[in-house]
Image (tube, grey):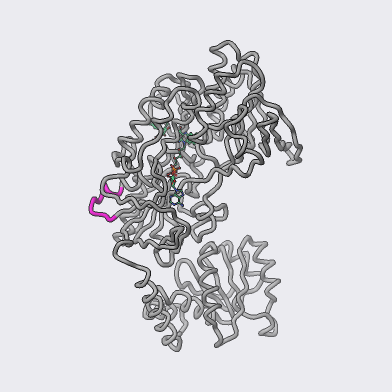
Amino acid sequence: MNDYKTLTPAISVAGQLQPDDMKALAEAGFHTVINNRPDGEGEDQPTSDALAGAAAEAGLQYHYLPIIPGEISDEQIQRFGQLLTDNRAPVMAFCRTGNRSSTLWALSQSSRLDPQTVLATTSAAGYDLEKQRPRLEQRWQQGQNADAARRSPANDWDVLIIGGGAGGLAAAASLLKRRPSLNVAVVEPRDTHYYQPAWTLVGAGAFRRRDTARPMTQVMPRGSKWIRARVAGFDPERNQVILDDGDRLGYRALIVAPGLELNLDAVEGLRDSLGHNGVTSNYLFEHAPYTWECVQNLKHGRALFTQPPMPIKCAGAPQKALYLSCHHWEQRGVLKNIDVHFHNAGEALFGVADFVPPLMEYIRRYNATLNFRSTLQAVDAGHRKAWFVDRDQDGNAREREESFDLLHVTPPQKAPAFVADSPLANNAGWVDLDPASLQHPRFTNVFALGDVAGTSNAKTAAAVRKQAPVLAENLLSVLDGRSPGAAYDGYGACPLTVEKGKVILAEFGYQGVLQPTFPLAPTQARSLYWWLKAKAMPRIYFDLMLKGHEWLTGPAK
Ligand code: FAD
Ligand code: UQ1
């Protein structure tokens, strides 16, 4: 392969590449290739189609943006900048010699980088772009003017946080604890903050719903400013977020924490069915009490509990609803009259193998039938019918109709659209992040935590409790011009409420490594942990975690 020149960690440029080079590029860590040389310019030049095919085979994104020498239009510059924003870095751009690609890079960055910096960068890579100076100067000036017009002193923040949920507020509290002078704002459209982990208990009559909601004003960490608005997009090149009314907010560092979206519309009929004829869900504040109502009323019949494809928040919650309902029916002596089914889109009862045997004991005790690879597709509350697609081990699909008297649905879940469609997202739509530092790989002043994070930990408030101090340390390092030094180990916890009064506390990190907090056998169901979940945890959450008191968590270095 030709020598290539690295302009920044996110982009390198090269002369003509061959299809055979693609594999080596992928092995060198590149994710994206941009071809700036028009087809047919040289004699033995490979076609763009041939290069695209080889790139695809090597697992690289490929884009063709042909440039005639000396004729770079503003539109092409804009398109090149967009490609850099939209595609995963590092990017390799090439033409005949690399000159056009480096010129495109220089011009595409010129509204946010001053001409001196741009020219020094290209010159260090061996490209003399001095004759572009007037155009660079002009674009830089235009960029400065546009920025000045957009900015006002009221909307520039040291740290801007998107979302006033568990992640956003814990991060704000941990930052302000370390540096009270920091200028921090939280953008959050709702006036109510919800403690979602207790909704499982609400669905079992073991917690009052109203105690899971607090006015946003009460939980906003002291020293942070609440901006009541909804974010609609990101402009990380300009260090700005875009609100749904078109206004912009500027920042030095950004924390993305808007959680995830329940995708109710992915199951036909679900939106209209919820709350009627036994169709319920603990995943919604509105409906969690209806679960308890249905459970109390059911004396015989069929009860179905569903779990959608991963990732979902608190992956244990779908089966917690099953155990707590069954335990109630067992105590009332009616369990023998109720046919209980668990329909799980996945392949295993729980993602960490150590916890499967003790959970299976409860499945047997409650006489529940397990249906794996079985995904809810549609529901009709009026006729009390649900339709599932079941797949066998080879992936063959079969539709199956089931009747029910109670249907507890865990809705499919996805990354919020405004994140998935943004330059911050990974291929699956979550915020692209280094799993240890929680820093974005391309926009180094951007961090994320909580359910929106593109990390493989269990999406739980327990994870947030450990992520917030790590993120706070690393963000302050970046603001101070240093590299992140703190590391998150993937901790998450799932208190599996196997009986009303007993919990198996599953605590584990990346790759399912067990991380018990207490020196007790981790797979044992305990009443101590029920007390932790039902009584102590809400206080730990509101009085410690959301206030920056980092209990049992110190960021590893
Ligand atoms: P959230 O807490 O959901 O907060 C996101 C915030 O962002 C919201 O306030 C929202 O209004 C705001 N937002 C959304 N879009 C925008 C926008 N465009 N602009 C600005 N703001 C926006 N975890 C545990 O640790 N243990 C448990 O036992 C447990 N059980 C659970 C049981 C259930 C039924 C559920 C639903 C969850 C459970 N969880 C549990 C998971 C836990 O609640 C979440 O992991 C946690 O709340 C994630 O925090 P977050 O800040 O990422 O998201
Ligand atoms: C936890 O830290 C946490 O977040 C604050 C939860 O969500 C509310 C939990 O459910 C659990 C179990 C933990 C784990 C905490 C300890 C102290 C073991």
Task: Examine the rendering and report whether any part of residue 191 can be seen.
Answer: yes
Question: Measured along the vertical axis of the image, is residue 23 above or below residue 323?
Answer: below
Residue 46: percent from left, percent from top: 69, 76
Does 161 sit left or right of 435 as displayed? left
Tell which quarter ligand 1 is in: top left
Does 383 sit left or right of 324 as displayed? right
Q: Quick one: quadrant of the N terminus?
A: bottom right
Question: Measured along the vertical axis of the image, is residue 172 above or below residue 303?
Answer: below
Which one is nearer the viewer's eye here, 56 or 336?
336
Question: Measured along the vertical axis of the image, is residue 147 above or below residue 391?
Answer: below
- Residue at screen point 32% across, 66% down: 152
Task: Examine the rendering and report whether any part of residue 485 can be seen.
Answer: no
Residue 432: percent from left, percent from top: 49, 54
Residue 463 drawn in magenta: no
Which one is nearer the viewer's eye here, 36 or 544?
544
- Residue at screen point 47% across, 46% down: 259
Residue 447: percent from left, percent from top: 41, 54
Residue 118: percent from left, percent from top: 41, 78
Residue 181 drawn in magenta: yes
Q: Which residues are magenta?
A: 175-183
- Image quarter of residue 142: bottom left
- Image quarter of residue 265: top right
- Residue at screen point 64% across, 80% down: 38
Which one is nearer the viewer's eye here, 270 or 454?
270
- Residue at screen point 70% across, 72% down: 49
